[in-house]
Image: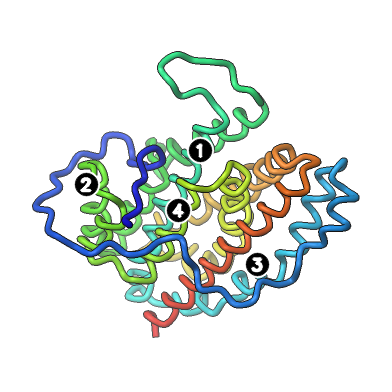
Amino acid sequence: MPLRLNVTRWLPFGAKTEPGEIKDATPFETGKVSCKALAPVLPLAEIEQNTEAPERASQLLRHALEPLRKELVDHAIYDAVDTLPRLRTFMTMHVYAVWDFMCLAKRLQRDFTSLDKLWLPPKRPSLARFINGLIHGEESDLDADGGTKSHLQLYLTAMDEVLAPSEDMRRFLSLIEYGTDPDLAMTLVNAPLCVRVFVGNTLHTAEHGSSVEVLSAFLFGREDLIPAMFARLLPRWREARTARNFAYYVERHIELDGDDHGPAAEHALAELCGADLGAWQLAHQSAQKALRARIELWNAVREELS
C-alpha cells in the first residue's frame, strides 16, 4: 500500500508551483530497512536500575548506539565529496533528507503542542518549548545575507549556487502541495531508489511511530548525528567561493544542532521516557533503525560518486 502522510507532510511556507501532469506510477514499499544484526544490545538491566535517573538511562542508550554512530561519522562519503561535480550529485540526493527532517520535526510539534483551531495549554510545557524553539530555527532561520528562510530553502539556494539540479526537488514539493502521496511523488520525479527507501522509512516513522520512537529517530538519526557528519564536510568547502551558501548551511546546522537542538532533544527524550523501561526499548529500536537507514543511504550515495 502507498504511504499516506496526511498530518506530517511539510512544505516551505509560500511554496507555489504547478504540479503538471500526474501519470500512473507504482509506489514503493516503505518502512523496511534491510538491517544487519542489531548490536550491541541495550543493557536493559542497567537501564532498569537507572530509570529513576533518566539522564543516566539516556547515556546508556547513547553508549549502545555508539558503534553505529561511529560507522556513520567515519563513513568514506565525506572525503568523496571533493569536487564540484560530486558535490552537485551529493546535494541532488541529500536534499530529500533535508525535507523529511522537517516531517519528523512537525510530527513532534503536533504531539507536544496545541495546533488545533481551539488552543489548549501543552501537557508538558518543557517539551513544547523544546520543539517550538527547534521549529523556529529550522523553519525560519537567517540566510547568509540576513534574509529569512527555512533550512530547505537555504539548501535549495546553495544548490542553485553550485549549479546542482534542483528541478526534481522543486517539482516534488509541487506534487506534495497538490496532494500527491510522497512515495508516488518521488517516483514521478525519478528520485533514486536509495533516496526513496530512506525517505519512505522516515515517513513511516513520522506517521506510525509513537512520540518516543519519532523523537529517538529524530535525536539519534539527525540532531545528534548531523554536527559530527557535517564537520567532516566543512573543511573542504568552508573557503570555497563557489559554494558559499553550502558552507553556510553546514555551519548553521553544526552550530544549531550541536549547541542547542541536539542537547535539547536529548533532555526531551529523557523526560518523555522517564522511568518507563518499555519506552527506552522503543527508543533504542527506533534509533537503530534510523542509523541503519542513514548508513544504507550513504553507502548508495558513495557508490554514485565513484
Q: Callout 3, which amino acid?
A: Arg
N-terminal label among 4 and 1 = 1
- Determine the residue positioned at 34% across, 47% down: 4
The amino acid beneath tag 4 is His
Circle 3 SS class: helix
Q: Residues within 10 Å of mark 1 (few under 14, many from 20)?
A: some
Q: CA distance from mark 4 to mark 1?
A: 24 Å
Instruction: Assess disc 4: are there few (<14), some (14-19) or many (≥20) residues with their C-alpha within 10 Å of its C-alpha.
Output: some
The residue mark sitting in front, 4 or 1, is 4
Sequence order check, earlier mark of 4 and 2: 2
Q: Which residue is mark 1?
A: 137
Q: Which residue matches tag 2?
A: 174
Of the pair 291 and 233, the residue shown nearer to us: 291
Relative image position of residue 19 (x, y in whole percent):
15, 48
Quarter containing the N terminus: bottom left
Q: Earlier in the sequence, mark 3 or mark 2?
A: 3
- Residue 87: x and y in percent read 38, 70
* Position above or below: 253 against 40: above
| Disc number for residue 204 | 4
